Image (cartoon, grey):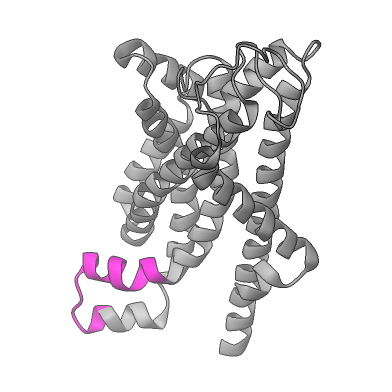
Amino acid sequence: MREALLGTALARTCCAMLAGVVLAAVIGPSLSPWALDAVDWDAIDAAPTAAHWFGTDGVGRDLLTRTLGGARVSLVIAVAATLVSCLIGIPWGATAGYLGGAVDQAMMRVVDGLYALPFILLVILLVALFGRNIFLLFIALGAVSWLDLARIVRGQTLVAKNEAYVEAARALGATTPGIVLRHIVPNVIGPALVYATLTIPGVVIAESFISFLGLGVQEPQTSWGVLIADGTRAMRSAPWQLLFPASLLAATLFACNVLGDRLRDAVDAGAGGSKSSVR
């Protein structure tokens, strides 16, 4: 993992970039002289200045503060949805793969059925039933982001359940839940967590898209999707309102994807080396 994250100049740059975004999202809004919803009546649609480094939006709010506040919301949603996908997808895939047979078929048909449900339709349905709420994003994103993870874990489990250590656990009288939790899950957790790192940028994009459509985060809260939607409407007269949030989003997604790809390659190389040494 150290080699994957720090082995090249690009990886180190992406780590520093991602750490900077997270740190700025955590402490930036608190250090800013402008509150998230504070209005500067003398600087409406103002270009970047010493007082407003990223300029202001259409009602005079500091764009730097709102961009960092939006980063906090978008990243929290992404991490929460990814944790939900791990908590559901890993046990689901491991159980289906280990039990096999009719149980496996039934569990994976549930996954296929959820795949067939349009994601945006699910979000619209939740909004219609419960109103616009940021927690609905956790539910909607978590409800679909675990599906790919469950399939990956199931595939890994189909291989792991025939290994010698699982056969030994069965011979010693271990129960099925004990084998799954103590032997299967720990041995498939590596590829699952690597995939989870690649889930984060996908969730960030999904949240931004939902908020761009007006179905996600609502005022006075903000997110990168909300800011990009506002910036798109003002891009001709105030292009900085789109440039800064979109650039920060693009940099974060780039860093996450590069690091996720390197972690995936490291896990694949480690698995190949382990198999070679066994042979």
User: Which residue occupies the foreground of this view, 58 or 201?
Assistant: 58
Point 78% across, 61% down: residue = 10
**What is the span of residues highlighted in magenta in the rendered image?**
170-186
Point 35% across, 53% down: residue = 96
Point 58% across, 39% down: residue = 202
Q: Quadrant of residue 81?
A: top left
Position of 234 relative to 105 (above/below): above
User: Which residue occupies the foreground of this view, 149 or 216?
Assistant: 216
Give the percent coordinates (x, y) of residue 21: 61, 47
Give the percent coordinates (x, y) of residue 256: 64, 51
Position of 258 relative to 183 (above/below): above
Q: In this image, 198 relative to 168: left or right?
A: right
Would residue 11 be seen by someone viewing this image from the given angle? yes
Give the percent coordinates (x, y) of residue 162: 41, 73
Q: In this image, 51 relative to 169: left or right?
A: right
Q: Quadrant of residue 16?
A: bottom right
Give the percent coordinates (x, y) of residue 146: 44, 43
Instruction: Tell me which secondary structure the magenta stretch mostly adopts.
Output: helix
User: Which residue occupies the foreground of this view, 165 or 217?
Assistant: 217
